[in-house]
Every structure is written in C-alpha cells, then in structure tokens.
Image (tube, rainbow, N blue to C red):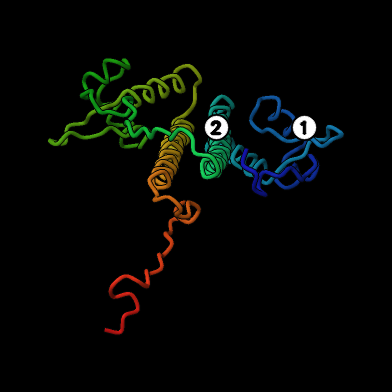
Amino acid sequence: MPSDAKHRPVYVISVAAELVDMHPQTLRLYERKGLIRPGRSSGKTRLYSERDIEHLREIRRLTQELGVNLAGVEEVMRLQHELDDLQGEFEAEIERLEGELRQQAARPGALPAPDGRLDPRDRPVYVISIAAELVDMHPQTLRLYERKQLIRPGRSSGKTRLYSERDIEHLREIRRLTQELGVNLAGVEEIMRLRHQLDAARSGLETNVRRIQDDITERMTKWRTLPQGQDADETLQGGSPASDPDPHEPGADDPT
C-alpha cells in the first residue's frame, strides 16, 4: 500500500462513522463484505484512514445517489482497492530499481533488458460484427456502450471500429455485471470507468519501470566504456569531469 498520510490509520470506528454519517455497525458490515479494509492497532482496535473515509463516502454516493446495488458496489470497491494496491506496487518497484541503480554503481552486474513490446491484448483486430458475435450481443448494443464510454474501440485508417481482446474482455464483464449481478447502468459506468483507470495505471507502471530500466542501462553502459581513471560517479549523475589542459600541449595557456 502507498505510504502517504492518506493511508495512515488514525480514526477509531466511532469517529469514522460520524465523519461519513453512518452507524458503526454499517462500517462493520462493509468490512465483512470486503468493501473497506481498516487497519488495526496493536490492541486490535479498528483504525480508519483518510482513504477509508473516501471509500465510505463513495459507497454512500453509489448506493444513495446512483441506486447501485450491493453487488455493484462490491465490484467498484474491488477495483478501487486494486488501484490502491497498484500504486503501492509502483512505489515499491521504483524503490527497488533505485536500489538496483545504487548497487550497479558500486558493483557493475548484468544490465536489465528493456522490453518495449505492446500488449497483444490491446491490438485492435475485430470488426464490430465479429466482436458482437464473440460476446453474444447486437452490434447496436456495442455502439451504445461506446457512446456511454464503457468501451473504447480503436479505428482503422478508414474509421472502421476495431475491437481488441481487452475490449472483448470488457464487454463480457459488462454482460456479467448486468445479467448475472443485476447492476444498473450507472453502476456499470462506475465499474468500467475504474477498469479503464486500472488498465491505464498498469500501463503507466510498466512504462515508468521500462523508462527507469532504460536509464539504468544507459548509465551503466556509459560507465563501462569510460576511459580508465575517469570518475564513474559523475557519469552516473549525468555529468562529466572537465580535463585539465596539458601545459606542454601547443595552445595550452599559450598567449600566442
């Protein structure tokens, strides 16, 4: 989990319940359902963070303002927790790579291999008729879901809709939410918005990790090719030491 102040458990259940205008028993119910995940003190007392308070207010908005049923709320909060966990993984990975860079500076080892391959699941390949057949929906339904921004198909050079494997996964998820769980359209919109956000966050994590790996590779390659005696630390910091002119070289401090 991210280590910032918003995730620090500070509120006992009575204070948390007052902040979100709910009964403490409601908070216990939401915890049993896995909708919120309060911390515990050394004495096993529930302690809620600012992030927990935000989650509780989001649950209230979904249920009271949008009329989303509990199954839909569970899906929304599961995705929200995945986003929180992904942020924590990102921070941990950045810390690991920074440690790796420090170790490489002290003792060069194998260089990380950057991988810039595009996830094949994001490649737009299916025209709308094939995509509709794969998910057992009418093509017009797919157009409706696109207008609602539940899915985001690509376009060919001729502006033809093209759906990826990930779009197909999203369409099957929409069908599961509506047909199996009875989630209303407002709830589906919230869930799919979070799914898109989660996909973008994962992609951003992979891009940032690759960028850092490339930076490590570039810096370590420069270090290994330095002339003997040059300061490696300055190169790793992006600088290069200036060399003193040879007083015996022609033109070195030569007024002529």
Earlier in the chain: of badge 2 and badge 1, it is 1
166 lies above or below 234? above
Q: Position of residue 103 (x, y in %)?
A: 56, 41
Q: Which numbered circle lies on residue 25?
A: 1
Which is more toward the observer, 190 or 110? 110
Residue denoted by label 2:
82
Which is more toward the observer, 7 or 25? 7
Observer-side mark, 2 or 1, equals 2
Which is more toward the observer, 13 or 88? 88
Secondary structure at numbered mark 1: helix
Quadrant assignment, res 211: top left
Q: Position of residue 243 (x, y in %)?
A: 40, 65
Amino acid type indicated by mark 1: Gln
Quadrant assignment, res 9: top right
129 lies above or below 56? above
Quadrant assignment, res 62: top right
Q: Position of residue 222 (x, y in %)?
A: 39, 47
Amino acid type indicated by mark 2: Glu
Q: Residue furthest bottom?
A: 255
Q: Is residue 110 visible?
A: yes
Residue under the image location 72 percent in, 28 percent down: 29
**Left or right, 72 with reference to 239:** right
